[in-house]
Amino acid sequence: MSGANLFLLRAAALGLCLLFPAAARAASSNSVHYHRCMADAVINPQAALADAEGWARAGGGVPAEHCAGSALFNLKRYADAGKRLDRAAGNPAKLDAAFRVALFEQAGNAWLVAGDGARAVQSFSAALALSPGDADLFADLARGHAMRRNWHEVVLDLNAALQLSPRRPDLLVLRASARRALKSYREAHLDLEAALKIKPDDGNALVERGLLRRQLGDIGGARRDFQAALKTATGAIAADAKANLEDLSP
């Protein structure tokens, strides 16, 4: 797995289907409409989009825009979703800060899945301007920079995230991936050892250490790490461990 792909794992797993109390308050008497539209955005996104578009034209405001963005995301129209969610977040007069942060973060993840790192960076930066003490937002911003292969910026973002949450193995693994891309191998190794000390069976850390070892020519060590990850991990991480193990086969 390349560093950029590792950074996309979280974004690809996200759906834009959460209901936010702030949006319900913004909807006022239309809160029932909002909740129904958001539920439809998951189970029948095409119908939800048609509903949201009509509601927006009738003055539905932010709740209608949020529903439209969520439906577009679930229709895999990720760039369109990013635009709608950014637009929904862009009106500070009508929203509290927490809900704007959530909308900008959702927009950023939509841009990531759309493959537009520059727009993702803009959305995540807007979220961070409203919530500067959020380690997850710094990690999100790092993902945006990773898509553009701005590895130095990625490391700075993750330094900030780890200042806020120093014992998170996921952040250490992400920084190790960026440092591997920068050929800062010693620092990458230290991050992975720290992550595995916190969580010895961390599949992501084992796969990343396998990639580091393979890059340094330690094929036997890489194989052991991929095998260990395959025993403990599930889902995408296990599939990645399996693919990397097969790549080592003669």
Image: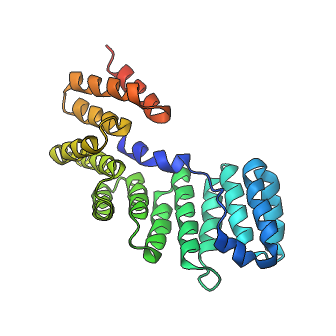
Residue 130 lies, in percent from the top left, at 47, 76
Q: Residue at x 31, y 41 (%)?
A: 199
Q: Residue at x 19, y 28 (%)?
A: 217
Looking at the rendering, which quadrant does residue 195 occupy?
Answer: top left
Residue 144 lies, in percent from the top left, at 43, 58
Q: Residue at x 77, y 71 (%)?
A: 31
How has the structure been colored for display? rainbow
Residue 121 lies, in percent from the top left, at 45, 64
Q: Answer whether residue 1 is visible to the viewer in this image.
A: no
Residue 203 lies, in percent from the top left, at 37, 35
Is 226 in front, or is 86?
A: 226
Q: Is residue 160 left or right of residue 94?
A: left
Looking at the rendering, which quadrant does residue 50 occupy?
Answer: bottom right
Q: Is residue 66 above or below residue 200?
A: below
Is 131 in front, or is 148?
A: 131
Q: Is residue 95 above or below residue 203?
A: below
The quadrant of the image that shows the N terminus is: top left
Q: Is residue 70 above or below residue 241?
A: below
